[in-house]
Image (cartoon, rainbow, N blue to C red):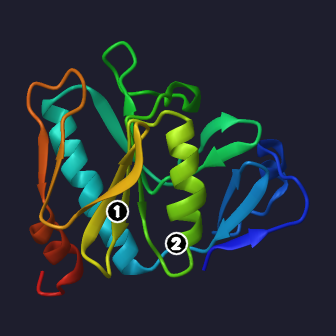
């Protein structure tokens, strides 16, 4: 469950004082969000999506995919750890410093019990305001991905196919979502 801690104003600097206890600590506009370690199916969804992205980005050298924990710091009051992120290349190479992650090409969150408010409201607004190219919310229960962009606040609900064509890529990434969710959720593997 994602908990919102208040009433004080939190900053990115405050994160250094928090315990290294397996929880994810994020600050969005002065609010502290605490999320416990994710469940196995969440991790399976993250790993599968990261593998798809890394395979694609190995061919189309426009970015590099990372998985959490990776601190993405937008300002002194905005620091998050997306489950998966795609950062642009730096001089043709993957970024090796957190400062080089921006502007994010894609930020991805896999919903967990209790994270819907943070993922669908606070983070969606943050990613749009920070100009993140695309924000994907993976809803395992619905077997769908919600996609938003800075130019349109309304989520696009994708259940069959996700097509992403980043600038500079010669071909788009096409994800068969039915096959993706089957690999993640069906235990026959």
Residue closer to the observer: 4 or 22: 4
**What residue is at 38 percent from the left and 36 percent from the top?**
133
Q: From this viewpoint, is residue 69 visible?
A: no
The image position of residue 58, as x and y in percent, is 18, 34
Residue at the farthest top position:
91
The image position of residue 87, as x and y in percent, is 40, 33
The image position of residue 162, as x and y in percent, is 17, 53
Label 2 residue SS: helix
Q: Residues within 10 Å of mark 2 (few under 14, many from 20)?
A: some
Q: Marks 2 and 1, Cα distance to the nearest angstrom?
A: 17 Å
Residue at the farthest bottom position:
187
**What residue is at 47 percent from the left and 28 percent from the top?**
103
Label 1 residue SS: helix
> On the image, which quarter does residue 43 sit in?
bottom left
Judge whether 49 appears above or below 101 on screen.
Answer: below
> On the image, which quarter does residue 89 sit in?
top left
188 sits left or right of 121 in the view: left
């Amino acid at each position: 469950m994602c908990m919102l801690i208040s009433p004080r104003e939190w900053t990115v600097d405050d994160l250094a004082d928090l315990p290294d206890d397996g929880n994810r600590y994020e600050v969005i506009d002065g609010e502290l969000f605490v999320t416990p370690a994710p469940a196995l199916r969440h991790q399976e969804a993250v790993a599968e999506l990261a593998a798809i992205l890394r395979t694609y980005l190995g061919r189309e050298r426009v970015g590099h995919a990372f998985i959490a924990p990776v601190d993405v710091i937008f300002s002194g009051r905005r620091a998050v750890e997306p489950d998966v992120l795609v950062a642009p290349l730096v001089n043709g190479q993957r970024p090796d410093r957190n400062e080089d992650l921006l502007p994010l090409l894609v930020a991805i969150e896999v919903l967990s019990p209790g994270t819907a408010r943070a993922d669908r409201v606070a983070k969606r607004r943050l990613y749009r305001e920070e100009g993140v190219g695309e924000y994907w919310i993976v809803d395992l229960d619905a077997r769908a991905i919600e996609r938003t962009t800075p130019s349109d606040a309304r989520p696009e609900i994708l259940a069959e196919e996700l097509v992403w064509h980043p600038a500079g890529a010669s071909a788009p990434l096409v994800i068969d979502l039915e096959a993706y969710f089957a690999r993640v959720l069906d235990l026959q593997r």
